[in-house]
């Protein structure tokens, strides 16, 4: 079934209103959210995504609903990786904790705009150049290998951020201290930008860098631009609350990158299998489709995503608990 145009437009309008309302709420009441508040918001956004899937299934077919759920689960899983870098950015720029909600929200909106443009370009390329799936698949497999050996990844992200900071400071006047949530302030009678503008840009650009991994991955699930963008919106909408909900727990999720590596590697292989299944390259099988190549169902992908993240999280928490017990025993013996 085709997704009705009225449903697509209505969905985007409603989601835009929710995002604006969320931003205004943060703007009017900057604060440090409690664990209970963060939990309720995460549950709200997860429930909203599931409700959207049910509505989509009724008006646009359950195949589209299933593709959305799988794509959303994929993007949500991969977006957790963003949180580690967000923690670094907040620490690097010494962002006051009560302002971090607004920083994350504005950064997420910037990321949505950039991802939207990225998705439009991606859909156009796929429609006119189907062998791009080979490139996407190889890129995701390479990214999976890099994720499995992440020692240098965090340093690379920090270097990118430092480069952005140096570039901006050479081009514009930036004050040394924050002035609340303002991005413009006056210092000794001179109008200047505050460090907040650097943080906004860094968060947005960093998320776009992560999108270079995640957008090709979701295109294996579906090439419907609306579903791809909707999955990204729902994955990012709850990211701010997830940041505060997980908090110090992020440091304990030491094996999470392995789970993400498995997901990216699996999707990369699935992309290449799909590319072989619909092959058009003349030097492969004479330009004919390779019919015997398996085309893995999206429900299998959803299962791999959920199992990978669950195993990585549980293993991380078990290892962390063992370390704490060992530290206690060591302290007592001394």
Image (tube, grey):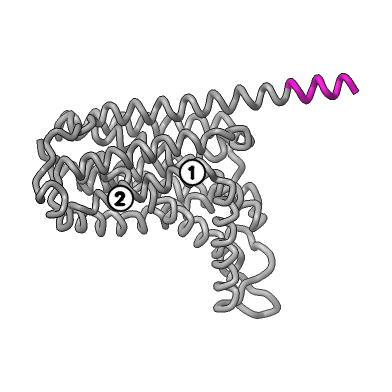
Residue toward you, 296 or 42: 296
Location of residue 113 (image quadrant): bottom left
Q: Is residue 328 magenta?
A: yes
Whole-percent x, y for residue 160 in the image: 54, 62
Work out which quarter of the rendered image holds the C terminus and state it.
Answer: top right
- Where is 289 relative to 50, above or below? below
For the point 28% across and 38% down, the residue is 270
The residue at the point 46 percent across, 59 percent down is 205
| Residue 119 seen anywhere in this rendered image of the structure | yes
| Above or below 206: residue 236 | above
Name the one closer to the observer, 183 or 214. Answer: 214
Helix, strand or loop: magenta stretch: helix
Left or right of 222? Residue 174 is right
Which residue appears at 12% of the width and 54% of the height? 282
Q: Quadrant of residue 92?
A: bottom right
Does the image show residue 10? no
The residue to which callout 1 is attached is: 147
Q: Which numbered circle lies on residue 297? A: none
Q: Is residue 331 above or below residue 204?
A: above
Q: Are marks 2 and 1 in contact (CB under 8 Å)?
A: no
What span is colored magenta in the figure? Answer: 325-334
317 or 7: nearer the viewer: 317
The spot of residue 276 in percent (x, y) is 19, 43
Q: Which mark is residue 136?
A: 2
Residue 196 occupies which quadrant of the picture?
bottom right
Q: Position of residue 27 (x, y in %)?
A: 52, 52
- Dot 1 falls on a residue whose secondary structure is helix
Q: Residues within 10 Å of mark 2 (few under 14, many from 20)?
A: many
Number of numbered callouts drawn: 2
Sequence order check, earlier mark of 2 and 1: 2
Left/right of residue 229 with respect to residue 247 in the rendered view: left
């Amino acid at each position: 079934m085709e997704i009705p145009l009225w449903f697509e437009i209505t969905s985007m309008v409603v989601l835009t209103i929710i995002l604006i309302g969320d931003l205004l709420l943060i703007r009017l009441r900057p604060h440090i959210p409690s664990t209970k508040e963060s939990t309720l918001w995460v549950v709200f956004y997860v429930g909203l995504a599931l409700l959207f899937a049910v509505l989509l299934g009724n008006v646009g077919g359950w195949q589209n609903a299933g593709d959305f759920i799988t794509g959303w689960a994929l993007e949500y899983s991969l977006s957790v990786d963003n949180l580690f870098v967000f923690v670094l950015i907040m620490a690097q720029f010494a962002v006051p904790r009560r302002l971090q909600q607004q920083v994350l929200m504005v950064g997420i909106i910037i990321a949505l705009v950039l991802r939207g443009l990225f998705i439009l370009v991606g859909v156009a390329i796929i429609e006119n150049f189907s062998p791009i799936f080979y490139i996407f698949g190889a890129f995701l497999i390479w990214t999976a290998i890099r994720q499995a050996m992440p020692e240098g990844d965090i340093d690379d992200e920090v270097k990118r951020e430092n480069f952005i900071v140096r570039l901006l400071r050479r081009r514009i006047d930036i004050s040394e201290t924050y002035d609340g949530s303002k991005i413009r302030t006056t210092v000794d009678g001179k109008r200047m930008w505050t460090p907040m503008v650097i943080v906004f840009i860094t968060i947005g650009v960093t998320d776009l860098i992560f999108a270079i991994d995640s957008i090709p991955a979701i295109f294996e699930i579906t090439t419907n631009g609306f579903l791809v963008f909707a999955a990204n919106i729902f994955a990012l909408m709850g990211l701010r609350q997830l940041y505060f909900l997980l908090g110090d727990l992020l440091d304990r999720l030491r094996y999470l990158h392995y789970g993400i590596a498995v997901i990216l590697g699996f999707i990369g292989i699935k992309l290449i299998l799909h590319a072989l299944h619909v092959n058009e390259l003349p030097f492969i099988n004479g330009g004919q489709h390779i019919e015997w190549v398996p085309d893995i169902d999206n429900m299998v992908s959803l299962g791999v995503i959920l199992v990978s993240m669950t195993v990585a999280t549980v293993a991380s928490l078990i290892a962390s608990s063992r370390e704490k017990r060992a530290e206690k025993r060591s302290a007592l013996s001394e």
